[in-house]
Image (cartoon, helix red, strand yellow):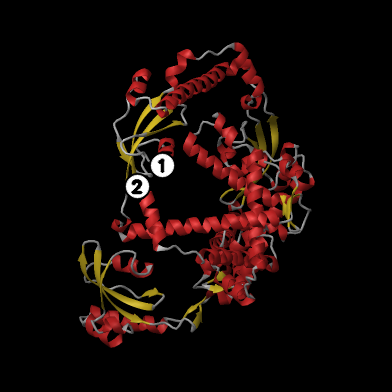
Amino acid sequence: MLQSIRDRAQSWVAWIIVLFIVLVFALWGIQDYIGGAQNVDVAEVEGIKISDQDFQRQFQIYRDQQRQQLARILGNDINNPLYKQLLNDASMKQRVIEGMIQSRLMTLAALEAGLRVSDEQLNDIIRAVPSFQRDGQFDADVYSQQLRYQGMSSKGFKSRLEQDTISRQFLEAISSSVFVTPQQVDAWLALQNQQRTLSTITLRAEDFRQEAKIDDERIRAFYDNNISQFMTEEQVSIEYVEFSANSLTAQIEVNEEALREWYEGHVEDYAVADERAQRDVLLAIRKRVLAGEDFAALAKEFSEDKASAENGGDIGLLARNVMEQPFEEALFALNKGDISEPVRTSFGLHLIKLTDIKGEERQASHILLSVDDKKLRTRSFEEVREQVAADYRARESERRFTEQHELLNNLSYEQPTTLEPVAAELKLEIKSTGLFTRQGGEGLAANPAVVNAAFTEDVLAGNNSEALEVGQDKLIVLRIKEHIPAAARPLEEVNDSIIERLLAEVTQALARKQGEAMLVRLKDDAKASVVAEELKLSWSEPESIMRDTSKVRGGIVTTLFAMPRPVADTSNYAGVALPNGDYSLIAFSAVTEFDPSKADESKRLAAQRQLEAAAVESILSALRTDLRLGADVTIFHKNLNGASN
């Protein structure tokens, strides 16, 4: 049940996203069109409010994306301090709300620019959405049903669709206005393919470890000043009831009277193209071929595929995934010389002969008779009884699920501090989990929707959650069983980690101090060999690199290509502190230019696209800044910072 709802609902959501951008959905959320309790607002843009629910939806998407990116970089060590630093809720909330404000301003700018979509265009878009169709045709009942699942009115949906389409047109108009000259492409290619020659000496922070002194007073001060970094993670356990829609279908009993009544009420659903005459003709032809007549001659006489009929029905060598699935399945099931039963595709009815096998390919001939899809035949109840029974169970299951889903929501809302009434009324077992953090846990606690719900303010305050979808055809309502707030870990427990962090700071500072001192001497014309000897290190062998090299650390490459060109046989020097705390001295000795006329067309095209993309982003950035400066925007920081995580 939930799967059917999900498939239809998510497919139109995904389709709308393809039309424009996920952000627009976050801004013009369904809560604009749903009745019920008033939302808390976190911002107002030109008189249009951004609700807490819309913000939360976008915030959770953004935070999950950031967690996934950090996991790829830092692994799954959730105790890594960078996790807490980079996943700071306050800073992320600010980034998300600013993004929502900017997106809303862009949408308003598109409207102000005069972009519009006619009702006819909107209707064409809606009619083309597969989830609003039945048997390939738009169905008003299906359309209305999908909107009900989303809690939206037709007017509200069309309003959002109009905004999405207009915004997409606005971005396309900006993008299409950008062009790049051949001279710009030449300059870009010359710059990007330029080579620079360097040598380096790297002072390792680790080598200064013996010089670093860390005393207890400094450890205590660091602990006191950074206490937020040494907090235990907040933990909760939950209890919940689980409601599965799968069990409903099996519980539905059917009888002949109910099935026949269903059939009579939906008889048009069981009509099919009347292909009996064509099928009889093909069966007669098949019988004649099996009796010894020539397939090619009969193809010339009967096949309505004129192109192949001239060749005796031959359609050549066919690999898999070329023809429609019914045709392919029938063809590849034949032995050489065999003739299929009539096969239905979108072109009509086929009689297929396998004439040869060459590796993974099949040489085939066919006779095609077209079928008038508008000429329908109503199948009898006996022909479609199994399908009728399945349809009846599905619709009845859907009806019961809707009723029980509503009852689940009502009971958990009306008595928000207990799950007992829900469990008793729906005959559900109250289950529980172990403790888990905001990063999740095991089993049910590994589901992000469950984790997010468990840590909302309302649930932490002791109330039941809303019904959550946690798997195929499964809903749960949860509440807090145990809550352990975050607390400072004792100094004794984190003492060693503090020492390591302080040692890293001190050794990095020492490496940088000595490196900068040596850089001053190099710029004062001290000999590079003398500096290397004093450091008891050696310069690396001169190496020519390009901007996109992966052989040299990124910080060194960036610094190298920002340095002024060396004069004659001299070298220019620079220093760079590396992310790992080491410090590198750079000797820049030569430049090798690139002739853009030698670049092939693919490189020129790639350069042109990069420049166009950069120009579009530059225009959009300037437009966003201008819109933001001139807009009437209010952020309700109290509501924003109090928004549930």
Quadrant of the image occupied by residue 253? bottom right
- What mark, if any, has residue 561 been given in the picture? 1
User: Is 484 above or below relative to 510?
Assistant: below
Q: In screen coordinates, is 556 left or right of 237? A: left
> Mark 2 sits on what residue?
194
User: Is 250 above or below relative to 81?
Assistant: below
Residue at x-position 69% and y-position 65%: 156
The answer to whether residue 470 is seen in the rendering is yes
Tell which of 636 and 343 is nearer to you.
636
Residue at x-position 42% and y-position 63%: 181
Q: In screen coordinates, is 132 left or right of 204? A: right
Residue at x-position 24% and y-position 61%: 360
Tally the marks: 2
Q: Are marks 1 and 2 in contact (CB under 8 Å)?
A: yes
Quadrant of the image occupied by residue 237? top right
Tell which of 109 and 30 is nearer to you.
109
